[in-house]
Image (cartoon, helix red, strand yellow):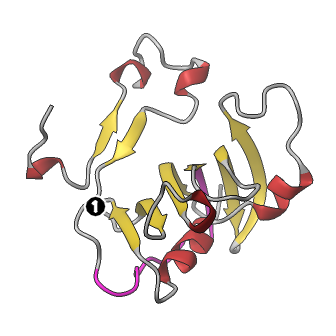
Amino acid sequence: MQLGPDALGKDLVDAACLDGAEAAGTAPCDPGPARWHLPSPEPAGRIDWAAPDTYTFQVTSMCGQRAFLGTFEIDVAGGEVTALEPLGDRFGESTMSEAVVESAMTLEDIVEEANRGGVARRVALDAEGTPRYVSIGRDPAQSDSTSCYFIHEFIPHTTNE
């Protein structure tokens, strides 16, 4: 399949996971219907994104040699992780290790990592400028020196939620 330039910056979704579809609500659809965000041209310079005070996001951290690998739903308030829930079957019935909890990242942390100078990166932003995919490092196949994040869902919260 070939996708034209109009597809850049958009999500590829699993239609069976959309609201009301046959697989919606099943475990494979826990991270939401988006399966990939097609990178748009990388923003020049720093990623200029300001996080709201409170938000929830779902992220798959898929590269690197570290504890924070897998798919998670993360609640953030005041720049700090306030809740972390593993999604999918990476952890099975067991509980997460303390190392995973301690290494959980906010979206601000991911943006800060991408904004550090001197590293190769690939970034996809949605129409509002929110990061949807970030890879850091020259070669994702060399997992010890690379970080990759796919942000499935981003939900900003108002102060009265």
Residue 66: quadrant of the picture: bottom right
Residue 134 belongs to magenta span? no
* Residue displayed at 55% across by 36% down: 31
Note whether residue 19 is visible: no
Q: Residues within 10 Å of mark 1 (few under 14, many from 20)?
A: few
User: Residue 46's x, y, as percent?
Assistant: 40, 85
User: Residue 119's x, y, as percent?
Assistant: 46, 81
Nearer to me, 159 or 139: 139
* Residue displayed at 41% across by 72% down: 121
Picture layout, residue 24 above or below residue 71: above
Nearer to me, 137 or 50: 137
Nearer to me, 127 or 71: 71
* Quadrant in the picture for the N terminus: top left
Residue 71: quadrant of the picture: top right
Is 9 situated left or right of 158 in this image? left
User: Residue 67's x, y, as percent?
Assistant: 76, 55
Q: Which residue is mark 1?
A: 127
Is 8 situated left or right of 133 in this image? left
Picture layout, residue 158 above or below residue 83: below
The span picked out in magenta is 44-59
* Residue displayed at 39% across by 25% down: 18
Q: Please, what is the dominant secondary structure of the magenta stretch?
A: loop
Nearer to me, 149 or 160: 149
**Amino acid bearing label 1:** Ala
Is 152 situated left or right of 85 in this image? left
* Quadrant in the picture for the C terminus: bottom right
